[in-house]
Image (cartoon, helix red, strand yellow):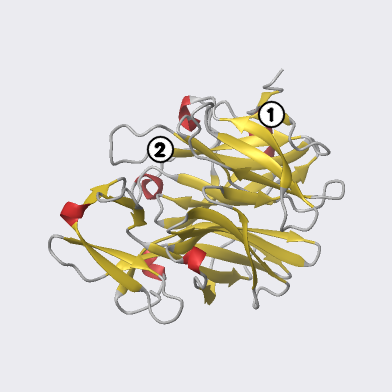
Amino acid sequence: MLMIERQSETVILRPSDIQPSQDDLRVVGVFNPAVASFGDRLVMLARVAESPTEVRKGWTPLPRFAPSGPTQIDWVKNDDLEVVDARVVAMKSNGDLRLTSASHLQLFQTTNRDGVNWQFVTAILPESPWEEYGIEDARLTKIGNTFWITYVAVSRSGAATALMSSNDLVNFQRHGIIFPSENKDVVLFPELIGDDFVALHRPNPHSHFRPPQIWLARSPDMIHWGRHALVLDGLHDWEGDRVGSGTPPILCDEGWLTLYHGCTRPSKAGTVGSYSAGALLLDREYPDRVLGRSAQPVLQPIRHHERHGFVPNVVFPTAMMDLGDNLHIFYGAADACVASVQLSKQSVLDSLERNPHE
């Protein structure tokens, strides 16, 4: 089995490092960080998941954000719910899904280029009806002088992808939904290709016709997306249940390099499979052309903080910085904490199965 040597491993943030957004909530996870360089500092947008502190025997609290005021808690009898997994329950009456925690984003920064000693800056809370059940899993990409942030907006209408932008990472403008439910894991390329903005996205976690997939889309203005093209099928056992884009691509000599996640099929009902990270090399001018992909993961959940948490056995890459010889990878571990690791860039490239579609 492929094992690329890990370097400079760090757990950056844990739930105990985070203040809850209100007194009757507790932080159950801080994870899936978006990271970018801004002047002399690094900035991070991390997902913070919270659940109610109150316990009522025989009842389950289901949080949701109100348009104004504090987070609301809907109490539902356990007998009226079916557990889907650690994060999700279904209403027995109609099959509607609810989350057992609600997420928002928190902004951190550090002047340490090694990616340690992060300081809290501000919180970004849900505002719109399509964010009623939370905002999750941001990806951060600088294009020109603008930081573009894709994130998952969760509501009773499903999990869609929405867009924010900022020139200073102090003031944020929301642009609404750009990919409807159930499309998520949207990452943006850091420059125009031709005259287009380009994104990788995951339109459906489970297709009746093919394995799980990652697609590519193009846009003239970052709002209207089309010209979709299939990029990747989840062909291997470690990505057999679902795949999704992970890190905004970086340009190297051979093309666009990005990490993605793959998940195994659950071993039993009510559980989640194991999440690992693979690498994907795309053509510089035609990024829907796959030049190389991982036959085996480049990162797997082997450390304690990756195997034990709110959702065990998860390595979920969401940001990657090019350090020259090494790749500095930021990821969510077990839906509980933010971690980082460095891998040799050449080792990752050497591990790829080349021209997999030929």
Q: Would you say 312 lies left or right of 231 here?
A: left
Occupied quadrant, residue 264: top left
Of residues 35 and 150, which is closer to you in this image?
A: 150
In the depicted structure, whether residue 223 falls above or below residue 201 = below
Percent across and percent down for residue 51 are 32, 65
Image quadrant containing the C terminus: top right
Residue drawn at (47%, 45%), measured in percent from left and top?
Answer: 315
Circle 2 residue: 274
Amino acid on which the number 2 mark rests in the picture: Ser
Q: Is residue 80 left or right of residue 113?
A: left
Residue at label 1? 292
Quadrant of res 20: bottom left
Q: Which mark is residue 329?
A: none
Q: Would residue 170 appear left or right of 25 to someone viewing this image?
A: right
Measuring 66% from the left and 42% from the top, which residue is drawn there?
258
Q: Residues within 10 Å of mark 2 (few under 14, many from 20)?
A: many
